[in-house]
Image (spheres, rainbow, N blue to C red):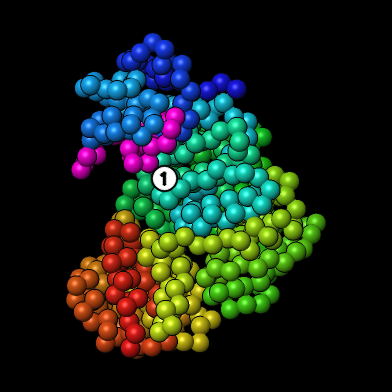
């Protein structure tokens, strides 16, 4: 098959090739934006950041094995070939789209307001039982991360699972133009990025831009428990999943504590089989269902699917259970919006311990911020959280909502320093402690403090 080379990159981007003539046809495999992550044969993308300029590290990238650099200016004393373009960000998107077009392997795109990463991990875990699967790493789900991920696709892979995150209109158009998914999973339409998207209808419009870039043979896999998705017509084949029997694939809870393990029966019109999920949170069943539908479309058996679901593991900051012997920490501080906080609080109901929730601001909720934060506080009281600890400007509304719903034990702190100083007096032995806030609140700073508690 055709491979990327500096010569092709210059042609795709309209850029100027600088370097030895005999290097123009060097095969390029993969890409990196950090010289410390460069592997032999990579394209190094020089990105101008707030703290560093990638152009200054071009030669270090060459020393690490880069085959070519993508740059916006001349690289003084360059020890390898490079292509000069107007914008490296726009150019890498063009290159990513071109590279994706070279493959006919199934590409699964995943988007939604909540649960994207969990679903991506679950789908990849299931597919990996039979298919070598490329998946998005860490938070590489944006307009830079997606093309870098696509450039890792090669002939050794059988499938790719690409997470697509957006915060504004038009972003999904640009992502989907590169990814062109054969299958698209939408996890939920929820309260996220409302400062730019306005309301739930706006979130739906932004997420579903993806279908402009799918072929008529593509397949949409929707969370059918979400009424907006249930009603939406993507213009292609649509398969729904959820816990409602109306869905094409639905699950019934069989046994377990919903904390360390849960068993479900997954049903469709043709079969019924059981799966065990060893992850915190009853909401994880939605990710397992999305993986079930996807894997079935790609020819995996129910036994393969059950094995893959059992192998799924959470990744840092997302419903990660840590039993210290003194307390049970639920590290869910990677990010938060109203839907994910409701899921985290609901999932704690099966615990016999005292339940403590440390909650911070949920950012980017626009005009609905006060209402959504108050709702979370009321919900925490409704599900019986024993101790609520709130921190952050907007989190004062969580505190107020909890108190107004007759929650009995609550504390509010304006800043983390004050909160951290108070934690030893608030948290007790055998507590289950949930930590959750938007990523910008940096609640991961609380974790080392809590993990040190020994009584």
Q: Residue at x 63, y 54 (%)?
A: 126
Q: Residue at x 74, y 58 (%)?
A: 303
Q: Nearer the viewer, residue 449 or 145?
A: 449
Q: Nearer the viewer, residue 25 or 381?
A: 25
Location of the C terminus (image quadrant): bottom left
Instruction: Give the x, y percent position of residue 422.
Output: 23, 82
Q: Nearer the viewer, residue 318 or 270?
A: 318
Q: Residue at x 58, y 78 (%)?
A: 257
Q: Nearer the viewer, residue 415 or 56?
A: 56
Side of 432 where 310 appears, left or right: right
Asked whether residue 125 appears in the rendered view, the answer is yes
Give the prevailing secondary structure in the magenta stretch.
loop
Q: Give the labeled residue for mark 1.
A: 140
Location of the N terminus (image quadrant): top right
Instruction: Give the x, y percent position of residue 6.
Output: 41, 19
Instruction: Give the x, y percent position of residue 130.
Output: 68, 48
Q: Which stretch appears magenta?
A: 32-52
Q: Is residue 288 magenta?
A: no
Side of 156 where 387 appears, left or right: left
The image shows residue 370, relative to residue 173, as above or below, that is below
Q: Residue at x 72, y 66 (%)?
A: 274
The image shows residue 8, relative to residue 345, as above or below, that is above
């Amino acid at each position: 098959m055709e491979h990327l080379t500096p010569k092709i990159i210059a042609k795709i981007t309209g850029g100027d090739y600088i370097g030895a003539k005999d290097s123009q046809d060097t095969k390029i495999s993969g890409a990196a934006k950090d010289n410390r992550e460069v592997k032999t044969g990579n394209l190094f993308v020089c990105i101008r950041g707030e703290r560093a300029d990638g152009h200054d590290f071009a030669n270090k990238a060459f020393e690490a094995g880069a085959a070519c650099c993508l740059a916006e200016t001349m690289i003084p004393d360059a020890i390898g070939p490079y292509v000069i373009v107007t914008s490296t960000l726009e150019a890498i998107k063009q290159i990513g789209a071109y590279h994706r077009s070279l493959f006919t392997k199934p590409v699964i795109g995943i988007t939604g307001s909540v649960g994207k990463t969990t679903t991506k991990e679950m789908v990849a875990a299931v597919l990996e039982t039979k298919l070598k699967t490329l998946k998005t790493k860490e938070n590489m789900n944006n307009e830079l991360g997606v093309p870098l991920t696509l450039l890792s696709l090669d002939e050794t892979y059988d499938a790719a699972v690409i997470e697509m995150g957006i915060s504004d209109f038009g972003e999904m158009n640009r992502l989907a133009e590169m990814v062109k998914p054969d299958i698209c999973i939408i996890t939920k339409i929820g309260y996220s990025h409302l400062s730019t998207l306005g309301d739930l209808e706006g979130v739906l419009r932004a997420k579903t831009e993806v279908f402009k870039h799918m072929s008529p043979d593509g397949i949409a896999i929707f969370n059918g428990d979400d009424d907006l998705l249930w009603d939406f017509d993507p213009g292609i084949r649509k398969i729904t999943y959820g816990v409602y029997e109306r869905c094409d694939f639905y699950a019934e809870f069989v046994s377990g504590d919903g904390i360390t393990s849960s068993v479900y029966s997954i049903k469709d019109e043709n079969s019924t089989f059981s799966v065990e999920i060893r992850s915190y949170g009853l909401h994880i069943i939605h990710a397992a269902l999305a993986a079930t539908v996807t894997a079935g479309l790609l020819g995996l058996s129910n036994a393969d699917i059950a094995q893959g679901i059992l192998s799924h593991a959470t990744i840092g900051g997302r419903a990660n259970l840590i039993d210290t012997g003194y307390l049970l920490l639920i590290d869910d501080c990677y990010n938060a919006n109203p839907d994910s906080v409701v899921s985290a609080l609901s999932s704690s109901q099966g615990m016999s311990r005292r339940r403590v929730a440390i909650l911070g601001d949920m950012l980017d909720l626009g005009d609905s911020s006060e209402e959504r934060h108050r709702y979370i506080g009321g919900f925490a009281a409704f599900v019986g959280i024993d101790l609520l600890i709130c921190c952050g400007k907007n989190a004062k509304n969580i505190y107020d909502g909890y108190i107004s719903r007759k929650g009995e034990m609550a504390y509010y702190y304006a800043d983390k320093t004050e909160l951290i100083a108070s934690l030893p007096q608030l948290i007790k032995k055998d507590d289950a402690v949930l930590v959750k806030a938007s990523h910008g609140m940096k609640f991961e700073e609380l974790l080392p403090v809590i993990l040190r508690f020994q009584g």
